[in-house]
Amino acid sequence: MTTSSTYDVHAIRAQFPILSREVHGKPLAYFDSAASAQKPQAVIDAQARYLSHTHSNIHRGVHALAQEATEAYEGAREKVRAHLGATSTREILFVGGTTDGINLVAQTWGRTNLGTGDCIVLTRMEHHSNIVPWQMLAQERGFDIHVVELNPDGTLDDDQFVQHLNRGPKLVAFTHVSNALGTVNDVKRWTAAAHDAGATVLVDGAQSVPHLAVNVQELDVDFYTFSGHKTYGPTGIGILYGKEALLDAMPPWRGGGEMIGTVSFENGTTYNELPYKFEAGTPHISGGIALGAALDWMNGVGMASLTAHEHVLTQHAHARLAEVDGMRFIGTAPCKAGVVSFLIDGVHPYDLGTLLDQLGIAVRTGHHCTEPLMDKLGIPGTVRASFGAYNTVEEVDRLAEAVARAAAMLR
């Protein structure tokens, strides 16, 4: 099985310095992009160039470096706006990552709109980052959380979703792509149904933006958040998109620095306009600029080409791993992104992951920050292979052969 002749995966791999190294004397095969993707040289150079030649604090300075840094940072915001199809940069907030974006919504929109007698809807496949902030707020504010369960193939139960919508939730929050199962959810259809029920919609895009073309206007979501480090960019930076009218109505979360309009002991404080009302303090300037470079890089490859390449890898991985004795796939939805989770009968996932590491193969083992999902499935966790733009069919073959070898040793 091969990918499109127009997709030169070896030329892409050459752009990632880390892929030339060895681990335990073996060539590195990196199958942990769902946890954090590797960085192309273009992103590394963009961050280094800013730090070497442009660094200054932004927005408030009149000198040349301050102006250059501000233009580069705000230029990155425009790149994000264009990539997501947002109406305005006023709708694009720089945050620390997906977790930070969800917490911002919980502590601003949630604190304002949720209280005793209300309910929200989450799903069984959510990452802890889209569970814990709502549990913390529910303990304080007294609202209920209803959970949409899974079908056996790892898709969400549509009938149960409709039943929960009949309860009149104020918020529906769910992931676009499951980090543990790879399931791609029908965001547009679910969002339309939630809006018809009067709910606001938040979507966790941490695992979708790296793999799929996303247009927030077409999806009509109210909030959408993703992380830079899963999107071939740096850690510590991410994006929260929010519809302008919602962001305008929300109170600020953190205070100080850029989020102020005026500050007075006598007359109190006024707040800055969007998006700066939610961006207190000096931001991760180099990270924002490098995130813009990462989106440039992805668009240079082409999102459709990247999606198609990863689809081939995912299909091939399922086919090859199915040949291993005792293989059990966790998540077999018909529409999946680049994630394959599995268990081998009689083999603990941690032991398998450790042996694969000795062969130079990096996979993730454990509950993948989805403990409620694993508890429901009655398993301690899985072995997860997740793919990126740089993985090859040959690496997948190497993975399957290594899994078979390691499983035989561990039985």
Image: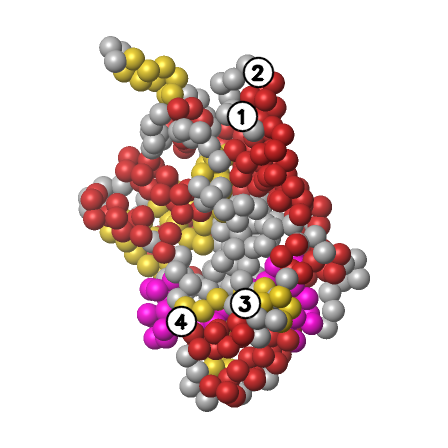
- The reply to whether discs 3 and 1 touch (Cβ–Cβ < 8 Å) is no
Q: Mark 3: which amino acid?
A: Ala
Residue placed furthest toward the top: 266
Residue with the mark numbered 2: 63
- For label 2, the crowd category at 10 Å Cα-Cα, with few meaning under 14, some 14 to 19 and many 20 or more, is few
Going from N to C along the chain, the mark reached first, 3 or 1, is 1
Residue with the mark numbered 3: 362
Q: Secondary structure at mark 1?
A: loop
**Looking at the image, which residue is at 24% across and 10% down?**
266
Residue 236: x and y in percent read: 47, 43
**Looking at the image, which residue is at 65% across and 50% down?**
40
- The reply to whether discs 1 and 2 touch (Cβ–Cβ < 8 Å) is yes
- For label 1, the crowd category at 10 Å Cα-Cα, with few meaning under 14, some 14 to 19 and many 20 or more, is some
In the rendered view, does 145 fall on the left or right side of 299?
A: left
Going from N to C along the chain, the mark reached first, 3 or 2, is 2
Residue with the mark numbered 4: 381
| Residues shaded magenta | 370-397
Pick the residue in front: 153 or 196. Answer: 153
Relative to 186, is 373 above or below?
A: below
Residue with the mark numbered 1: 56
Q: Mark 4: which amino acid?
A: Gly
Relative to 188, is 368 above or below?
A: below
Residue 13: x and y in percent read: 70, 58
- The reply to whether discs 1 and 4 touch (Cβ–Cβ < 8 Å) is no
Q: Secondary structure at mark 4?
A: loop
Q: Which is in the foreground here, disc 4 or disc 2? A: 2
Quadrant assignment, res 30:
bottom right
Going from N to C along the chain, the mark reached first, 4 or 3, is 3
Q: Which is in the foreground here, disc 1 or disc 4? A: 1
Q: Mark 2: which amino acid?
A: His
- Does residue 384 belong to the magenta stretch? yes
Can residue 167 be seen by looking at this rendering? no
